[in-house]
Image: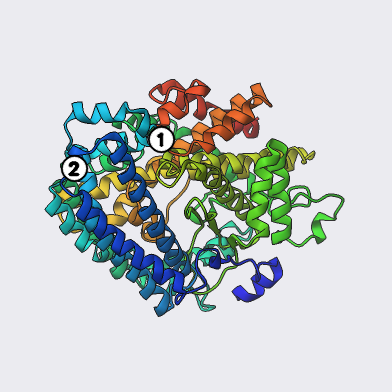
Amino acid sequence: MSEKLNEKLGTIGIVWKLNDMYKGHNDIDMDKDLEHCRSEAEALNTLFAEKVKTLSDHELLSLVKRLENLSTRMGKLATFAFLNFSTQTNNAEASALLQKIREISSAVGKQTVFFDVEWSKLDNKAASKLLQSSVLEKYQHYLDNLRRYAKHLLSQTEETLLLEKAPVGRSSWTNLFDKVMGHMKFGKNQRTEEEVLADLYNPDREIRKKAASELTQGLSGHLHILTHIFNTILADKMIDDRLRNYPSWLRSMNLYNELQDQTVAILVEAVTERYDIPQRYYKLKRGLIGLDTILDYDRYAPLPHLSGNTAETRGASNKDDENHDSHITWEECKKIVLNAFAGFSPEMAEIAGLFFDRNWIHAPVQPGKRGGAFAHPCVPEVHPYIMVNYTGNIRDVSTVAHELGHGIHQYLAAEQGYYNSDTPLVLAETASVFGELLVFTHQLATLTNPDQRKAYICQKLESIFATVFRQVAMNRFEDLVHTMRRDKGELSSDDFSRQWILTQKAMLGDSVTLTEDYGVWWSYIPHFLSTPGYVYSYAFGELLVLSLYNLYQKEKEPFVPKYLELLKSGGSRTPYQLLEPFGINLDSPQFWQGGLKIIDDMLLLVES
């Protein structure tokens, strides 16, 4: 079935060209890089272990540069192995390569972990003197960042032992999760996860109901495995947090994002206090789609004037809506996104065009391919890659814009070098959400029919709800299950389901009726496993972007270079410092409330 869809949408040939990194599994350059990484790691250990405290600024610079070069090569190897596996999770050779690279990365990490430990535990006075040296200016933020973890690092022997076991730790369990989900087929037609999820946006209620039932049945058939995976990863994090003396399950993520705990608490509180916004919307939607009760599988039902993806919404004109194919082809998607980006910045559109034209995207739906979508940075000398599962609806166009925003951010930040281009997750979502908003505003301007405009605003509101309110509700779910796992021990599937329903109901109130089947839908969300605590970054990014876009509306052209400079800066400074040019105070409840008011104002347009 997916082959027919791909042919219809024109995505059959839209596959990425990984030979920009390596020609394949047996590429001799891969073997050379692997050998170099092994030998260089051993050499660095021999030359510098137990000597970091004696290094001058020039010697420290030399060591950091060599470590960065080593990390860059390992990053290239890991990226190839991961991307190669992502589109063929049922391929044993691809799986074996991914595990091999992870094991080698662990071995390299064992040899170089001395630097993190010794540098982090260096006397403050000696470290400050080195950080003030102009010689180390390029790496000042990176080195200062490493010292944030000082009180959470173990001894070098213990850190080495943890690295030794890492290949059979969390990454191995997330690998199993990807395999299980990649092999899973849904319903009598044996469809993929993406094909079933796409039906939840169908205007026909029976099709939505059938899709929800098929998804539930498929997940339920594997729930014993998925529950075990979730429990194991929760326990792994519990043990790691205990060993490293993190005061809460979320602290390590906040530290990684270079945020204070209070900043995240203020964000979460601001969002949960405005759960009235989605509740008002879904009560309104009942009437708009002609239902007495909205069930969970009705939430994404398109409004009548959006269900056909009209010609205007698609970026076309002067076409008969009733006779127009309801699917948006890949070429149409490309045109919509590039036109929207070009209206903001020709440079952004030019970079996005590279992804389309140079095979940096993998778009078709296919068996064994990982679900969802992502943008993956590679190394400074090799471009990022994007994976989507394109099914041809307007939501997928937004997804492409979202991932291209990530890709553009990663492409521009590469000039900072491997270490400084790594952007904290909360700012990594800025460019992606901004890309979505550009497409929305560009398309909205093409609509003249009031009902179509209202329907399109509703579609955007639902996207924002998924990014802000749903992600914070999922953060609340994570908070409960991590806490329960630590207090109670291993959780049952029912335990997970109860907390899932509880946190979803808190967001939706009585505006949506959640069925019993919906209780297992926590089990297919990969972020809970691969990056615990990550989901609040979406809400952070969305509310930040709404504020930034509001500034753009006021400043127009002068805003664009400031925004592009933010993307080019990568992770070279903290989020607080990077946002200073925009006058943003992340610790102000009023700032987050301002973003939420913009959402409220959009809803008022629909309610009026």
As drawn, 93 above or below 230: below
As drawn, 193 above or below 239: below
**Picture residue at 75% right of the left edge, 37% below the top:** 445
The quadrant of the image that shows the C terminus is: top right
Taking depth in this image into account, of 133 and 186 the one nearest to the observer is 133
Q: Say which residue label 2 marks.
A: 118
- Do tag 1 and tag 2 residues touch (Cβ < 8 Å)? no
**Corner quadrant of residue 492:** bottom left
In the rendered structure, which amino acid carries the disc numbered 2?
Glu
Taking depth in this image into account, of 436 and 126 the one nearest to the observer is 126
Residue 294 in sight from this viewpoint: yes
As drawn, 30 above or below 558: below
In the rendered structure, which amino acid carries the disc numbered 1?
Lys
Cα separation, mark 1 vs mark 2, equals: 20 Å
Where disc 2 sits, the SS reads helix
Q: Say which residue label 1 marks.
A: 138
